[in-house]
Image: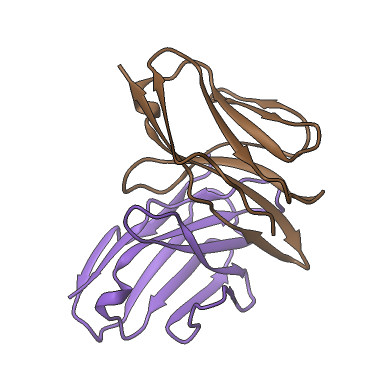
């Protein structure tokens, strides 16, 4: 199963775009890239996911490199409520068994 | 959107007792459910994956006799921590998925377990 690496922490000014990188250099062809965030003492919240193409929804944009070895989550206009730990994970089926591994995540601090 | 309800949200009990945590998918059928454990300031650690109607697949190092998982229906999975001890104190989180890897997992709000 592919593992992911992320910077441990990042700061972003309120109102600016937050760009959170993720490296998944061992990702295989059938593995999806997912992003979640976790606010203290709560369960993770789904943000966005993709396989090969860039994706956008009401929360964020996901940019996946052509070789799929890395991706970037973009929060276009960060607010104080976006302060959280952001996790990038990969997910696939393997013989009917789904494997999901969380990395250490990036602690994003949005600064007023 | 998809909602996963986890109960209880907080439990404190004496060492040696067993504790059951429920995870319910409220508005979708969860073919697969995942159980995680999270220690303070650490990431989520996958404990086991269960598909409805079959035995759970446990991660290496997780004792299946200690952490009993039942996924008897498409909307309910339970985790029972048997003979709990202080070192089992942790934040336990479940998630549920209604399909293959192109469908997101949805997480419950977690259960904080404290064993005295």
* Quarter of the C terminus of chain A within the rendering: top left
**Residue B14 sits in quarter:** bottom left
Q: Residue at x 64, y 41 (%)?
A: A23
The answer to which quarter of the image holds residue B58 is: bottom right
Residue at figure coordinates x 52%, y 41% from the top left: A36
Is B45 positioned to the left or the right of B50 in the image? left
Task: Answer with the quarter of the image where residue A48 lies.
Answer: top right
Tell me: residue B49, above or below residue B40. Answer: below
Q: Quick check: A50 above or below B109?
A: above
**Is B52 located above or below residue B83 in the figure?**
above
Q: Position of residue B80 (x, y in %)?
A: 40, 77
Residue B35 x, y percent position in the rendering: 49, 64
Q: Nearer the viewer, residue B81 or B47?
A: B47
**Which chain has been coloured brown in this picture?**
A
Q: Residue furthest top?
A: A15
Viewer-nearest residue: B87 or A104: A104
The spot of residue A61 in percent (x, y) is: 61, 24
- Please name the residue shown 67% across and 42% down the image: A33
Q: Colour of chain B?
A: purple
Residue drawn at x 46%, y 57% as measured from the top left: B44
Q: Quadrant of the N terminus of chain A?
A: bottom right
Relative to A77, say whether B94 is above or below.
below
User: How many numbered marks have been drawn onto this rendered protein structure?
Assistant: 0
Residue B13 on image: x %, y %: 20, 75
Scheme by which the image is coloured: by chain
């Amino acid at each position: 199963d592919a593992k992911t690496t992320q910077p441990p922490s990042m700061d972003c000014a309120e109102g600016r775009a937050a760009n959170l990188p993720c490296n998944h250099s061992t990702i295989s062809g059938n593995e999806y890239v997912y992003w979640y965030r976790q606010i203290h003492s709560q369960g993770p919240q789904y943000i966005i996911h993709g396989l090969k193409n860039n994706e956008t929804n009401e929360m964020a944009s996901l940019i996946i490199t052509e070789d799929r070895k890395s991706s970037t989550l973009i929060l276009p206009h960060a607010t104080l409520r976006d302060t959280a730990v952001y996790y990038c994970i990969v997910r696939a089926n393997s013989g009917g068994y789904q494997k999901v591994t969380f990395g250490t995540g990036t602690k994003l601090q949005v600064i007023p | 959107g998809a909602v996963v309800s986890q109960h209880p949200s907080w439990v404190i009990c004496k060492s040696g007792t067993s504790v059951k945590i429920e995870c319910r998918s409220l508005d979708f059928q969860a073919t697969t459910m995942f159980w995680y454990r999270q220690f303070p300031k650490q990431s989520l650690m996958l404990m086991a994956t269960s598909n409805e109607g079959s035995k759970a697949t446990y991660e290496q190092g997780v004792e299946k006799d200690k952490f009993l998982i039942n996924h008897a229906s498409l909307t309910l999975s339970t985790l029972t921590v048997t003979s709990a001890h202080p070192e089992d104190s942790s934040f336990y989180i479940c998630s549920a998925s209604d399909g293959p890897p192109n469908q997101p997992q949805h997480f419950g709000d977690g259960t904080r377990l404290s064993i005295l």
